[in-house]
Amino acid sequence: MDREQEEMQFLGFFGIHKESFKAIYAWRKIFSNIALSLILPLSFIYLVHMEVSSLFFRKIDHNEIELDHTRSGTPKYEKLSDLISNELAYFYLFKAAYFTLVFIFSHLSTAAVVYTIACIYTAREFTFKKVMSVVPKVWKRLMVTFLCIVVAMFFYHVVAYVVIIIWAISIGATDMGFAVLAVLGILYFIGFLYLTIIWHLASIVSVLEEAYGFQAMVKSKNLIKGKLWVTVVIFLMLNLISVIIQIAFQRLVVNGSNLGMAIRVVYAIISFLLLSMLILFGLVVQTVIYFVCKSYHHENIDKSALSDHLEVYLGEYVPLKAKDVQLEQYQV
């Protein structure tokens, strides 16, 4: 992050990755501590969720098959029915605990990484202890932004559902209908990806600027203009790598009983470390993209003003006003 602000706008796919790698390497001690305290637990929770969910599904499926071959009204039937109900209840409780923990650790990780990159950018002195003391104070802003994204996603899927109903009624399962459905599917994916990018960038805005919630979403939508394609490619690449890691874990660990316990443990550790590194790198990349977009739109960020904004987090949080953080545009 040693580039001048005017130069940040010229960073492309490789430049953004290079800046991210440089930041992580130069401040590897701080990022290692963040990974150990927040990102490793997040990765562990995610992978354990995959393993435990698979165990639940296998057990429930086995009992349902046995129930289908049992005469109804018999004591065995009633016992199996109660057992399946209990297992489903435990499964839903597990899911609730999982989503709660993922929600907490993902937002804490985001806050920690964004604050750290901002401190590096402003050449501000900071320690891991300071970073961790700031993280809980950003929680409310990130939570509001996340809830706004949930609302936006809900209405987006309602519209998509309405469109599918209209398709089924008007065209249906014809040759032309399947072609139209394929086009609708592509458009749905593009819209979903666009909303996801806005969500991630809005989280950065919520930490570094006074805007949060729907305001942060609007701000992020405006920021990615002009840098949309490089942002899309980066997000697609990161998500593709994440999917590959998940598929490998599912096949080699969750469903790899024929490989032996020792081999499965080795694959589990590799998947765990790869996913943790990917999450850390992805959060750093998102923050670098934010600074690239600010530079592209000639929104010159006054490092001293941003530093003062970061200082506020160490005391009682009072959002910095737009005139202080939304720095004036520089002349090109």
Image (cartoon, rainbow, N blue to C red):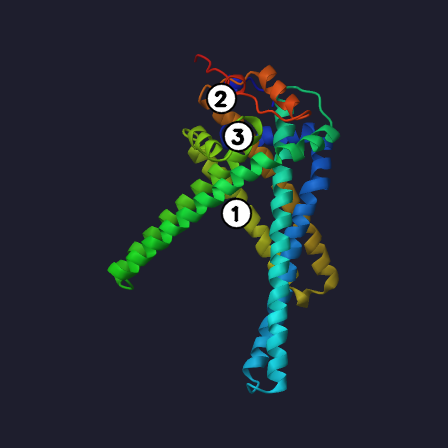
Amino acid type, residue under disc 2 in the picture: Ser
Amino acid type, residue under disc 3 in the picture: Val
* Residue 118 located left or right of residue 6: right
Amino acid type, residue under disc 1 in the picture: Leu
Label 2 sits on residue? 295
For the residues bearing labels 2 and 1, Cβ distance under 8 angstroms = no
Between label 3 and label 2, give the one nearer the viewer: 3
Identify which residue is drawn at 64% across, 59% down: 94
Q: CA distance from mark 3 to mark 2?
A: 14 Å
Residue 252 at least partly seen: no
The earlier-in-sequence mark between 2 and 1 is: 1
In the picture, the quarter occupied by the N terminus is top right
Among the 4 quarters of the image, the one containing residue 56 = bottom right
Identify which residue is drawn at 32% across, 51% down: 183
Q: Label 3 crowding class (10 Å Cα cut-off): few <14, some 14-19, many 20+?
A: many
Q: Nearer the viewer, residue 14 or 295?
A: 295
Q: CA distance from mark 2 to mark 1?
A: 28 Å
In the picture, the quarter occupied by the C terminus is top left
Between label 3 and label 1, give the one nearer the viewer: 3
Identify which residue is drawn at 57% across, 56% down: 247
Q: Secondary structure at mark 1?
A: helix
